[in-house]
Image: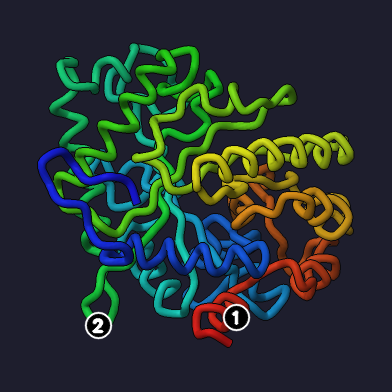
Amino acid sequence: MAAMLMGTMPLAAQDTPAEKMLSKLKKVKKQGIMFAHQDDPVYGTTWKWDLDRSDVKEVCGDYPALMGFDLGKMELDSKENLDGVPFDRMRHEIIDQHQRGGFVTISWHLWNPVTGENAWDPRGHAVTAILPGGKENAKFKGWMDKVIAFFNSLVDAEGNKVPVIFRPWHEMHGRWFWWGSNSCTPDELARLFRYTYDYFKEKGVDNVVWCYSPGADRKESEERFMTWYPGDDYVDIIGVDIYCGDNHQEYIDNMKKELKVMAAIADQHDKLFAVAETGYRNTPKADWFTKVLLPSLLDDQPLYVLLWRNAWDQPEENFGPAPEKSCADDFRLFHADKTTLFLRDVMKINKGR
């Protein structure tokens, strides 16, 4: 994990919940690619809020190895996130996934602290405003305190804190978020990442593995990928967000390029690397999983690949498999492939079988 704050002694290896999870993730990485899905157990293409359901599980009989959730609107004291998921339910599902033997990753589409609009409002130079000395710094510290309280509330049946991968300030390369390239400088974004990390550590958060995740670029290079990088002491996993359009070969080529760049960086900086977001809207190609996604991942295999959510109320927000979709049979082949890892696979790996 990253270095401790100045004046404190570094923790022994594998002493914290985060260090223990990192050790498990490194072990899993040697065995294959974990499949992940956003909001997997809380809603699907035709249902919402049922317990013990999952579109993925209903297709292949197995849960994803890793599940994704988002904390947007927690900063506003909302009881539900920006997609309507109750935070109490989210806590329950995170703990359940951990106790099954799986993993969890969390993003944060937080509201613009200057304009009061959502994360996609780039106005107001909000990054400058929330850094120390800025006019909204006190507000932002209060927002971080709410997230910190949530992370510290993740406790399993034995009273142990549940570790998660945290992916703040993602897609900073783009212009759509208020922390994006059109709203702050690379140095300001890197400072914000470090400030967030240090504040969490100061408040005793020891169950977070940190992920740095810009978006893809057709002219990807190591230099471009590292433009906003906060430093090795603040990052455990590097990731990329890359989506598929109708030109499937272009997606395969771009994915391979991104993974090659990340693999080189990960090797140089001793980090894990992952596909933090991907998917093909509605998955209209029946064999997309085995003929497009899987081949794109094989040359430089990431720790995991996360498909975005299956929204029941927004047909355009539909990226994972589901029983009624034409890709269901192909997804079962994807699940059966020896390269892909689902929940039962990582359970066996972590038990040493």
Q: Which numbered disc covers residue 344?
A: 1
Where is residue 214? Give x, y as percent. Answer: 54, 32
Please tell me which residue is depicted at 28% across the width and 18% down the height of the picture.
Answer: 114
As measured in the structure, the alpha-carbon distance from the residue carrying label 1 to the one carrying label 2 is 22 Å
Above or below 101: residue 168: above
Residue 87 x %, y %: 32, 57
Front residue (pair 66, 150) = 66
Q: Secondary structure at mark 2?
A: loop
Q: Which quarter of the figure has residue 349?
A: bottom right
Q: Position of residue 75 (x, y in %)?
A: 26, 40
Tell me the number on the disc at residue 25: none
Answer above or below: position of 172 versus 147: above
What amino acid is found at the position of numbered circle 2 in the picture? Glu
Identified by mark 1, the residue type is Arg
Residue in the foreground of this view, choosing between 182 and 301: 301
Q: Furthest-left residue in view?
A: 7
**Label 2: which residue?**
158
Along the horizontal axis of the image, is 214 left or right of 236? right
Q: In the image shown, does 28 or 318 lie closer to the viewer?
A: 28
Residue at 67%, 36% in the rendered image? 261
Q: Please, what secondary structure does the residue beneath circle 1 have?
A: helix
Q: Position of residue 333 (x, y in %)?
A: 83, 71
- Along the horizontal axis of the image, is 337 left or right of 207? right
